[in-house]
Image (cartoon, rainbow, N blue to C red):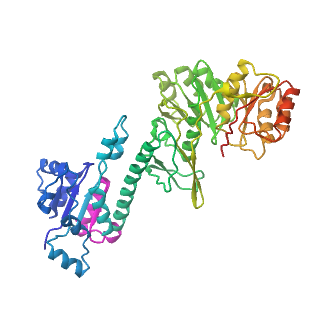
Amino acid sequence: MKNKRALISVSDKRGVVQFARELLEMGWEIISTGGTARALREADLEVKDISELTEFPEILEGRLKTLHPLVHGGILGRRDQPLHLQQMEEYGIETIDMVAVNLYPFPEVVSKEGVSLKDAIENIDIGGPTMVRAAAKNYQDVIIVVDPSFYSTVIEELRAGGDLALETRYNLAAEAFSHTAYYDSIISNYLRGRAAEEELSFPDTITLPFSKVQNLRYGENPHQKASFYREPLAPLSSIGSARQLQGKELSFNNINDLHSAWEMVKEFEEPSAVAVKHTNPCGVGSAEKLSAAYQKAYNADPVSIFGGIVALNKEVDGVTAELMATIFLEVIVAPSFSREALEVLKQKKDIRLLQLPLEKQNKTSKGYNYKKVSGGLLVQEDLRELYIPEDWKPVTDRQPTDQELKDLLFAVKVVKHVKSNAIVLAKRMQTLGIGAGQMNRVGAVNIATNQAGESARGAVMASDAFFPFKDGVELAAAAGVTAIVQPGGSTRDQESIETCNKFNIAMLFTGKRYFNH
């Protein structure tokens, strides 16, 4: 009986020598290319070069080596079709029974800073995906292996029964098509991203390549299954790039809340702390020192912060760590932790600590934001802003003081991240009351002013959208609010302006709405 043949050509060479050795021990013949062939020969394994099979040299700097009828005929030819077998014999095509291939490291290359388009293009694999797809299409006759993690399964099953079950072959084929689809999606998105550096394009079709990081214990609720997937070319300062320093595995809700907290704290230049529960901030503070900023965030709502997520935009020092260690927090995320902070926080083993760099970026540069709906996907620009308070339009008799303007800017940065309808009361760079996710704006004002209580006197207020009626402004005035910032644009804007003038409240229009549903 003729030996079976495996074509092995891999960029990821983990485990390939042992895999090939075990195939040889079972009587398989190995065909290989370039660097893979060299690696196998260096391990004293018997290998046939692809050029020996095709009787044609590898040319065009390795671009052309496997795209040949003697290769693809051996992969695609069906063993149960007499015509295929007849034509293969006629043209001297021998069967290839296994293809073990993974692809040029395009994702790794383009993730490097400063990579040129030329280098990126050179790392687009052509022959590899073609062989993978051919083998996967003919999976009943050809075993396709695209990941080193599958080597042991394949070897164990071959040793046990001499062949793979049809179900195993089918599963390997499905993985293979996922492998090439993921690879091509990265290439497509990379090239489109380069072509749209200044303005986003909304192409006719989109592909979203993500790779699984881990299974999660459950989803938003215990009876829901869940996993976490990472973008292949994710920004450095994104949750997918975080490094966990201690604590239990993150849950679905932890990761969702982390995203909200981290995106919010990145808005601030000065030392700042953001505490989040259920994707909404419960307390935000900024100060000259991080410890003071955290204390402000804590004092804003000492009840809700318990069991919450805290994001900080500066290195956590020992003093700040001591403050945070006094209550139960689920997760703390920061650009770094001092040695003293780690010594304090390691005593609280259940606290998850995440280190995540604050990437310097153009805040006006846009990415995509996705919302899944039944049967479709909504796609929009990310809501990134370069805040210019000087461009905000004063519409009342009284102008805001310097401190009020500073607090209004602080409140706007927070309200942008609060679920709509959203209202934020703030004073001296600290949130005092937050009304989130309400069906009407006056309800959000009620929640925020009630939470602030007497502290609302002298506070400022930010609204994510215009006031459709003057009642929200009247409630703010009764609570003691002295300045308001909102987009403007209501047909009843004049009523709100007149109410502000009546109570000597300064009001600014930004011209920008910040809905966050």
**158 or 90, which lies in front?**
90
Q: Is residue 247 left or right of residue 272?
A: left
**236 or 285, which lies in front?**
236
Quick check: is 413 in the magenta stretch? no
Q: Quadrant of residue 479?
A: top right
User: Bounds of the magenta span?
Assistant: 139-168
Q: Quadrant of the N terminus?
A: bottom left
**Residue at horizontal 31 percent and vertical 54 percent from the top:** 147
Q: Is residue 501 left or right of residue 308?
A: right
Residue 399 visible? The answer is yes
Residue 504 placement (x, y as % from top left): 85, 24
Residue 204 placement (x, y as % from top left): 50, 56
Question: Looking at this rendering, what residue extends furthest in the right direction?
Answer: 502
**Residue at horizontal 70 percent and vertical 35 percent from the top:** 511
Question: Looking at this rendering, what residue extends furthest in the bottom direction?
Answer: 82
Number of numbered discs overlaid on the protein picture:
0
Figure check: 240 above or below 132: above
**Residue at horizontal 58 percent and vertical 61 percent from the top:** 375
Figure check: 405 above or below 192: above
